[in-house]
Image: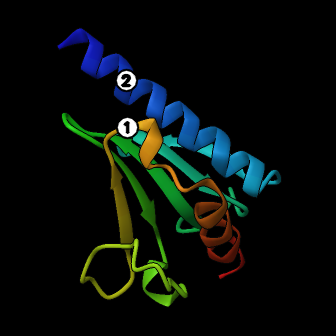
Amino acid sequence: MKDAALNLLSLAKELEALILRAVPEATTLSKYGGTLFTLKPDEKEGQFCGVFIYSGHVHLAFSQGARLDDPKKLLAGQGKYRRHVNLKSLDEIDGPYLEGLLQAASRL
């Protein structure tokens, strides 16, 4: 069980690093049990994405994900705004594709 938790923590840290590589001007906020990323830290709802660790996966959430162009259909969710990707291991990270989504999300 400890190995699984460490793997999810490593996965979350890798996703956070990917976000900061894709959008280096982003600021992080610890909120809702995860890490939010924003370009407008003074605005209550200025975040564009967040990383959250759950018991069996890491959740990469996009605040305005429904507005993103996602030709690979990687984003899940049916809500009015948010979309997400659930990842269980490092090898599931499609770096270049996620970077493109993150950059687009930061511009919304």
**Foreground: 22 or 45?**
22
User: In this image, 32 relative to 106: left or right?
Assistant: left
Q: Quadrant of the C terminus?
A: bottom right
* Residue 89: mark: 1
Q: Residue at x 27, y 76 (%)?
A: 77
**What kind of residue is marked 2?**
Asn
Q: Quadrant of the N terminus?
A: top left
The residue where tag 2 is placed is 7
User: Residue pushed farthest right?
Assistant: 25
Q: For the residue labelled by badge 2, is the local secondary structure a helix, a strand or a loop? A: helix
**What kind of residue is marked 1?**
Ser
Q: Residue at x 60, y 66 (%)?
A: 97
Q: Residue at x 55, y 43 (%)?
A: 15
Q: Earlier in the sequence, mark 2 or mark 1?
A: 2
> Could you tell me residue 45's position as x and y percent?
53, 68
Q: Residue at x 46, y 37 (%)?
A: 90
Residue 94 vertical position relative to residue 84 in the rendered view, above or below: above
**Foreground: 64 or 4?**
4
User: In this image, 54 relative to 81: left or right?
Assistant: left
Q: For the residue labelled by badge 1, is the local secondary structure a helix, a strand or a loop? A: loop
> Could you tell me residue 50's position as x and y percent?
48, 53
Are dots 2 and 1 in contact, CB under 8 Å?
Answer: yes
> Could you tell me residue 79's position as x and y percent?
27, 82
User: In this image, 21 relative to 58: left or right?
Assistant: right
> Could you tell me residue 18's position as x and y percent?
65, 46
* Colour scheme of the picture: rainbow
